[in-house]
């Protein structure tokens, strides 16, 4: 059923109506087939970009939509209701634009940002490595200055859009300084020496490619350094706060889709001569699912509104990511249970929803890391 939303302007209500229509009529009907083929829906992502979703939160001066985060996240949630992989693509792309939009020079933004926000290009965010996931500061990919270029060597892991992105925002070590040794480079996909590896074989989000990126003496012009040398770790962690809100919204959207599917199923399915929905145990499950989703939505919106007001929101971003993804895991598992044996088959989408949300408890910082962030905030 449609979510009853509180939106700040008539413009935002029109935008959400457009996104909702797209999610229900263009994305949802195609999701299962693409997921089964493990095919990235690049044309559909471009369609989403053409309505402004790939640059929704950024300045109009550079082609963005200048929308507040509370609007962007609700639009992202609607996309996720239709298809998690497309919503994830928007979230990751939005995060990949953040270092340039926030820390780039005016010249850099004028040169590259309009194309990144325009809808045709797709970005990737290269922070993790095989030995540095949660501990981002221990990354080992290196870049050294050689005249007017940087030369990169190393391997980035778990890169969403690896092999299909047009550019890679790459965090690399430019010195051995523990706190200020990491820098950020905007690396074009056609850079010589940049080699996407075969996609990972995953449990879910099969239409969203995840791959390692090998950098073998990859040469990048020095003017593609974003911010100062050594400012990369601060930049990465700042971007992750925004990305966690995106994942919270995506997880909430998938959970809402699972609840909606379960409600329709139990209303139609009969046992002992009555609809399953009339059993008190079933109605209580639905009530708990709906309450958890509403709490997740309220938590990510509260964090987004803090961000829109310019207030600190890092701990709230961690709380929203933690709550939304744990809730989505429970809701989708319960949806499979309510479908009974049918829920375990690929004939219905609830098993896919369950597989998709599992990874959301892991990426953008595991939920154990979110608990550490929140705990440190409380006790510092």
Image: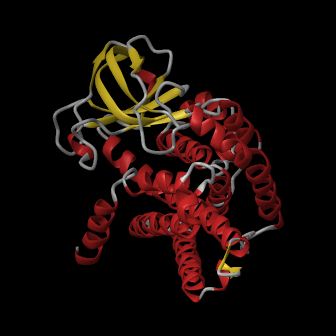
Where in the figure is residue 74, as x and y percent of width and height?
65, 62
Corner quadrant of residue 129: top left
Q: 329 or 52, which is in the foreground?
A: 329
Q: Is residue 203 left or right of residue 273?
A: left
Q: Quadrant of the N terminus?
A: bottom right
Q: Is residue 140 left or right of residue 215?
A: left
Q: 373 or 2, which is in the foreground?
A: 2
Q: 344 or 136, which is in the foreground?
A: 344
Q: Is residue 147 visible?
A: yes
Q: Is residue 86 left or right of residue 220?
A: right
Residue at left offset 83%, top offset 60%? 14
Where in the figure is residue 32, as x and y percent of width and height?
64, 43
Q: Is residue 118 visible?
A: no
Give the total of numbered labels. 0
- Position of residue 294 relative to residue 235, above or below, is below
- Position of residue 46 relative to residue 213, above or below, is below
Q: What colour-coding does the image apply?
A: secondary structure
Residue at left offset 54%, top offset 51%? 352
Where in the figure is residue 52, as x and y percent of width and height?
73, 44
Q: Quadrant of the C terminus?
A: bottom left
Residue at left offset 50%, top offset 69%? 334
- Which residue is the extreme one toward the bottom? 280
Where in the figure is residue 65, as x and y percent of width and height?
71, 49
Corner quadrant of residue 367: bottom left
């Amino acid at each position: 059923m449609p979510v009853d939303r509180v939106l700040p302007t008539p413009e935002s209500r029109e935008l959400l109506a457009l996104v909702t229509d797209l999610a229900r009529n263009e994305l949802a009907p195609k999701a299962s087939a693409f997921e089964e083929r493990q095919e990235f829906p690049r044309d559909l992502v471009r369609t989403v970009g053409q309505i402004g979703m790939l640059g929704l939160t950024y300045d109009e001066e550079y082609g963005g939509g200048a929308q507040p985060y509370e609007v962007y996240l609700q639009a992202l949630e609607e996309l996720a209701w239709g298809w998690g992989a497309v919503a994830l693509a928007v979230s990751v792309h939005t995060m990949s634009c953040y270092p340039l939009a926030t820390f780039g020079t005016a010249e850099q933004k004028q040169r590259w940002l309009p194309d990144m926000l325009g809808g045709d290009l797709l970005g990737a965010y290269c922070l993790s490595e095989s030995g540095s996931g949660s501990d981002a500061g221990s990354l080992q990919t290196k870049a050294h200055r050689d005249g007017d270029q940087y030369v990169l060597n190393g391997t980035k892991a778990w890169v969403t859009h690896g092999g299909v992105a047009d550019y890679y925002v790459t965090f690399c070590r430019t010195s051995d300084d523990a706190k200020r040794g990491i820098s950020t480079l905007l690396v074009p996909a056609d850079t010589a020496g940049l080699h996407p590896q075969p996609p990972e074989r995953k449990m879910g989000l099969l239409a969203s490619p995840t791959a390692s990126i090998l950098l073998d003496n990859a040469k990048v012009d020095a003017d593609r350094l974003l911010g100062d040398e050594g400012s990369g770790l601060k930049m990465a962690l700042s971007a992750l706060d925004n990305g966690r809100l995106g994942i919270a919204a995506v997880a909430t959207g998938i959970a809402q889709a699972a609840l909606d599917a379960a409600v329709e199923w139990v209303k139609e399915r009969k046992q002992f001569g009555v609809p399953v929905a009339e059993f008190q145990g079933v109605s209580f499950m639905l009530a708990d699912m709906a309450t958890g989703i509403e709490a997740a939505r309220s938590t990510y919106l509260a964090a987004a509104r803090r961000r829109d007001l310019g207030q600190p929101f890092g701990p709230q971003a961690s709380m929203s990511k933690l709550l939304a993804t744990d809730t989505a895991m429970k809701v989708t598992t319960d949806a499979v249970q309510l479908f009974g044996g049918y829920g375990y088959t690929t004939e219905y989408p609830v098993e896919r929803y369950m597989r998709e949300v599992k990874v959301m408890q892991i990426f953008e910082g595991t939920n154990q890391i979110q608990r550490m962030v929140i705990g440190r905030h409380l006790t510092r």
